[in-house]
């Protein structure tokens, strides 16, 4: 597949938080199910601290946790990249009002797999591959009932600039939206 290395953790405020705790004895434990979903705290300042740690590391009342046995732990302050959530978003659409689980398994059995996945070339290379990877993991763990997440893929191609190259800001061949608005309203 020629998969690229993928650094999974990010030192930033936004993203999906890892639901794990680091204990004082250097153990790593997962949050209990009743403590899920783990949500990021509301903050006024999420600028980097300059230490190399995530901005979440500065929020001591969120980071420091007392476990049921009275021992102390710290939340993981790195977050997952946006790809983590986008790899299973189609499952969340099945049951968007569910506050306790990502989706109801009966709804998943009824609706899956997705009939049609439409995406650009970049989706076929990265997103589709990662979505399939995660779906197969969820299948192996018994969380989904289908081996594949999508029945059919339609790739609508790549938008090209006047020079015939992929349209890209870095290539300087994009259409400026300000010009389009000025010309057409």
Image (cartoon, helix red, strand yellow):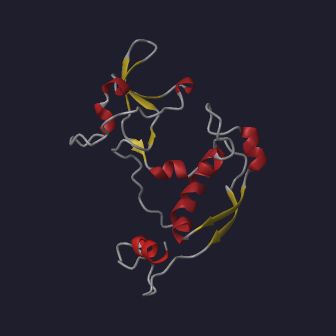
- State whether residue 51 appears in this view: yes
Residue 40, x across and y down, in percent: 43, 34
In the image, 114 versus 8, the foreground residue is 114
Quadrant assignment, res 101: top right
Q: Count the labels in the image.
A: 0
Q: Residue at x 28, y 42 (%)?
A: 47
Residue 92, x across and y down, in percent: 63, 45
Q: Residue at x 36, y 36 (%)?
A: 77
Residue 26, x across and y down, in percent: 34, 27
Q: Residue at x 76, y 45 (%)?
A: 109
Residue 117, x across and y down, in percent: 65, 63
Of all residues shown, which one is farthest toward the right?
110
Of all residues shown, which one is farthest toward the bottom?
163
In the image, 173 versus 94, the foreground residue is 173
Of all residues shown, which one is farthest toward the left?
50
Residue 115 lies left or right of residue 14; in this view the side is right
Q: Residue at x 72, y 51 (%)?
A: 146
* As drawn, 5 above or below 24: below
- State whether residue 23 appears in this view: no
């Amino acid at each position: 597949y020629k998969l690229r290395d993928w650094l999974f953790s990010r030192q930033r405020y936004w993203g999906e938080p890892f639901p794990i705790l680091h204990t004082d004895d250097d153990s790593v434990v997962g949050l209990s199910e009743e403590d899920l979903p783990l949500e990021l705290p509301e903050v006024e300042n999420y600028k980097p601290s300059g230490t190399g740690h995530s901005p979440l590391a500065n929020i001591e009342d969120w980071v420091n946790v007392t476990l049921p046995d009275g021992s102390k732990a710290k939340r993981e302050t790195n977050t997952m990249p946006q790809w983590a959530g986008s790899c299973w978003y189609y499952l969340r659409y099945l049951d968007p009002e569910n506050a306790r689980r990502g989706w109801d398994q009966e709804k998943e059995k009824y609706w899956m797999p997705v009939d049609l996945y439409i995406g650009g070339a970049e989706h076929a290379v990265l997103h589709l591959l990662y979505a399939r990877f995660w779906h197969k993991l969820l299948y192996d763990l018994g969380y989904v009932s289908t081996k594949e997440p999508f029945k059919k893929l339609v790739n609508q191609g790549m938008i090209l600039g006047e020079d015939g190259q992929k349209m890209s800001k870095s290539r300087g061949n994009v259409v400026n939206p300000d010009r389009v608005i000025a010309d057409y309203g």
